[in-house]
Image (spheres, helix red, strand yellow):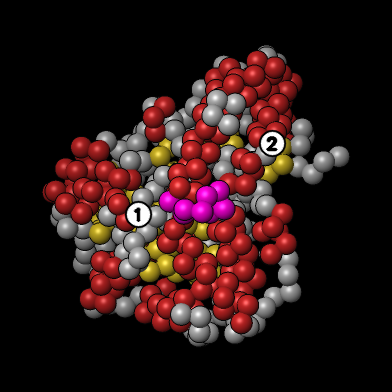
Amino acid sequence: MTSPLLMIPGPIEISDGVRQAAGVAPPSHVAPGFIEDFGRALELMRYVWCAAADSQPFIIAGSGTLAMEMAIYNVVEPGDAAVVVNSGYFSDRMGEMLRRRGVAVTHVRCAPGAVPDLEAVEAAIAAVGPALVCATHVDTSTGVRVDAARIAASAKAHGALSVFDGVCATAAERFEMEAWGADIYLTASQKAVGLPAGLALMVASAAAMARRAALKTPPPMYLDWDSWTPIMRAYEARRPSYFGTPATTLVGALRLGLDEILAADSDPARAMEARFALHQRSADAMRAAWSAMGLSLVPTDARTAANTLSAVRYPKGVDATLPGLIKARGVVVAGGLHPAIKTEYFRVGHMGHVLERPEALERTVEAVGTALNGTGFSVDVGTAKAALWAVLGEEA
Ligand code: PMP
């Protein structure tokens, strides 16, 4: 039997190249090859993030939650105010981190599956005058994507910094860090970047770095950019340096993974355009298949449905046993996550390397369709697959 296909919204299927790079004997953190990989990975991050030349990338051992905490602790301090554009589960987490940092938090909330109203966001920023505006680019719990360009612009217009949690978006959803004026864009290695879990990744703007320099209450040492910036700068200058041992094997895999992401074109900006377009097309194709099966999505407005995952409602008569039935057909999908609707939907990731193997998307559609037929909710799997291929074939 073929091995199960991992189609959850992270960790994701990884490429053979990344798998090999992640399987080498762990190098020393001062080995010449490692120094080159680390330096190059930092440089490549700026391209994948569409970030400014004077921005600072960080590669830190840890998960996405560490990246969130590091971002927050370096740009706000006790007594500051922040606005959280709250689209679900991970925005709540961001709010709690801010609260623990002693920051006064104003949430702009929405119903599960919706995104906060941008005029309400603008009004909250104008009323609060926050030091920071935070948003989750793609909320993994509901599959919605916020308008990061507009939020970054609103923050900037009011003199606030902006932080975007891109854990379920970076390297897949369009994000033009420099052009949009965003200050921090963070992610974790196990999602669209296409690595095993274990790296917290972020790029900070010059303005965000200046804010750290002005803080009166420094972050804990491991979270502190002041601990890590000299290390990142040294490796980028191809010199080894030490604060805490880097995840050497994963850093090597990261260099390779970023190279693969940018391989589509010799011009990195064009490579990223191709990357964003691939995710858009693949997501449109998956949505066409769900629709052909008569399924509806958690996102209430099709324009805000994320390209990295589908959050799909169980049809009438089908319950949370469905993911188990899909798994029995060789495809692993995830159950619901948002506490208010947890048992009402399932989630299918479609990001990263797997999109270059569209037959994997077909296998997923087939597994979901046949599993549904096993429940008594009848779908035409052939029609769903045809709908998928009709979109995949459009510009391929
Ligand atoms: N933010 C978002 C949007 C996420 O999807 C996740 C993980 N699913 C996190 C933050 C936390 O990342 P990690 O699990 O790597 O700590």
Kindly report the distance in space between the C-alpha atoms of the residues bearing marks 1 and 2.
31 Å
The structure residue drawn at horizontal position 68% and vertical position 29%, both measured from the top left corner, is 362
Q: Looking at the picture, how far across and down is residue 32, in whole percent? A: 61, 82
Q: Looking at the picture, how far across and down is residue 258, in whole percent? A: 55, 58
| Label 2 crowd (10 A; few <14 / some 14-19 / many >=20) | some
Give the overall secondary structure of the magenta segment: loop
Residue on which disc 1 sits = 177
Residue most extreme to the right: 1
Closer to the camera in the image, 90 or 163: 163
The structure residue drawn at horizontal position 62% and vertical position 69%, both measured from the top left corner, is 252
Q: Amino acid at mark 1?
A: Met
Name which of mark 1 and mark 2 comes first in the sequence.
1
| Label 1 crowd (10 A; few <14 / some 14-19 / many >=20) | many
Q: Quadrant of the N terminus?
A: top right
Bounds of the magenta segment: 262-269
Residue most extreme to the left: 127
Instruction: Give residue 360's mark.
Output: 2
Q: Looking at the picture, how far across and down is residue 268, in whole percent? A: 46, 54
140, above or below 83, in the image:
above
Residue 289 in view: no
> On the image, which quarter does residue 139 sit in?
top left
Disc 2 secondary structure class: helix
Q: Amino acid at mark 2?
A: Ala
The structure residue drawn at horizontal position 69% and vertical position 64%, both measured from the top left corner, is 21
The structure residue drawn at horizontal position 30% and vertical position 45%, both measured from the top left corner, is 149
Closer to the camera in the image, 52 or 168: 52
